[in-house]
Image (cartoon, coloured by chain):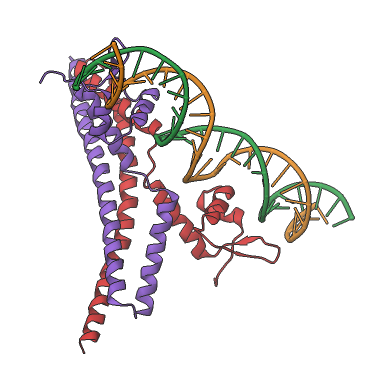
Chain colours: A purple, B red, C green, D orange
Amino acid sequence: MIDKLYKIEQVSNITGLTKRAIRYYEDLDLIRPRRTESAYRLYTEEDIERIKRIVSLKESLAFNLAEIKQTLELEQEVENILFDGTASLATINSHIEMIRRQINLIEEKVGQLLATRKKFEDLLIRLRSLEEKIREEEAK
Amino acid sequence: MIDKLYKIEQVSNITGLTKRAIRYYEDLDLIRPRRTESAYRLYTEEDIERIKRIVSLKESLAFNLAEIKQTLELEQEVENILFDGTASLATINSHIEMIRRQINLIEEKVGQLLATRKKFEDLLIRLRSLEEKIREEEAK
DNA sequence: TTTATGCTTAACCTTGACGTTAATGTTAAT
DNA sequence: ATTAACATTAACGTCAAGGTTAAGCATAAA
């Protein structure tokens, strides 16, 4: 399997991005696929990995104001339920469910961020040992 | 200190948001300050806490494409340095510094997210005990 | 009392991150 | 050989999240 190449629609299916988004990332110089003679974009596995990282970095984030509003509203509702204490089991259970979903969402984001952090920590360790090596060489 | 009230500029200074942003959040119904007779907005401490939570929820996220690009570029540069192994100490140290900054940034975001998760976990626990209480009462 | 500063609404402007459409070229299958 | 299903660029549209400007009240200090 040496260097299989993909066209944009395949890449779109693999990554979940639209073709428009993929081309847009190229405009921003985030990726640089090669081209066929007739100018079709061709993506390597590496390109695709890179796109997946972009997606993951984006997803680890995004909470827009509408989502923030929902989050705050959910909190408020639950506090009201706890305060007056007379809610039905159905109401309570549906709110338990909603909170669980929020927590899962947060957990996912945290996971993405920790993966990114790990990447950088690895690089940091390797850079430090390179630094030491060079320092030793200079000492000679 | 019973219920001190703040005008919008003070709130802007306290929260770091522009007045425009604060008014915009009101348009979106994220906050509802009271008004003076001459229609000046008046914010309670509670309002301000709420605004701070909004800011924190927003910040815990946001990585735009430009930032993603920088991140990927930094990674690439470091990998090149590690690969050819002949960089100067100055180069290495400056890259160590940049990576450290990235890690700190990620750490901050993770911190925000974990604080939010804790809020929800507390609510979840309290909801569950309310549920049990109600279940017991219904059993009678 | 004037002046500076701050507040209000309203309306238009901007930027990022794409969506959509149009006009046209390429390739694969029948 | 034609058609269907892909691809290309270019250009305009859209939506969120504000920025900016204008025109006019409100209020505090000199």
Residue B18 location (% of width, % of height) = 56, 47
Question: Which quadrant would residue B70 be assigned to in this image?
Answer: top left
Residue B23 location (% of width, % of height) = 57, 53
Residue B70 in view? no
On screen, residue D9 versus residue A55, left or right, reads: right
Tell which of A113 and A7 is nearer to you.
A7
Residue lying at 38% horizontally and 48% vertically, measured from the top left: A63
Quadrant placement of the C terminus of chain B: bottom left
Quadrant placement of the N terminus of chain B: bottom right
Question: Which quadrant would residue B126 be assigned to in this image?
Answer: bottom left
Residue lying at 37% horizontally and 29% vertically, measured from the top left: A20
Tell which of B50 and A127 is nearer to you.
B50
* In the image, farthest residue toward the left: A1
Q: Taking B136 as reference, is C20 above or below it?
A: above
Tell which of A94 and A121 is nearer to you.
A94
Residue B98 in view? yes
Q: Taking A17 as reference, is A135 above or below it?
A: above
Residue D28 location (% of width, % of height) = 73, 59
Report the label total.
0
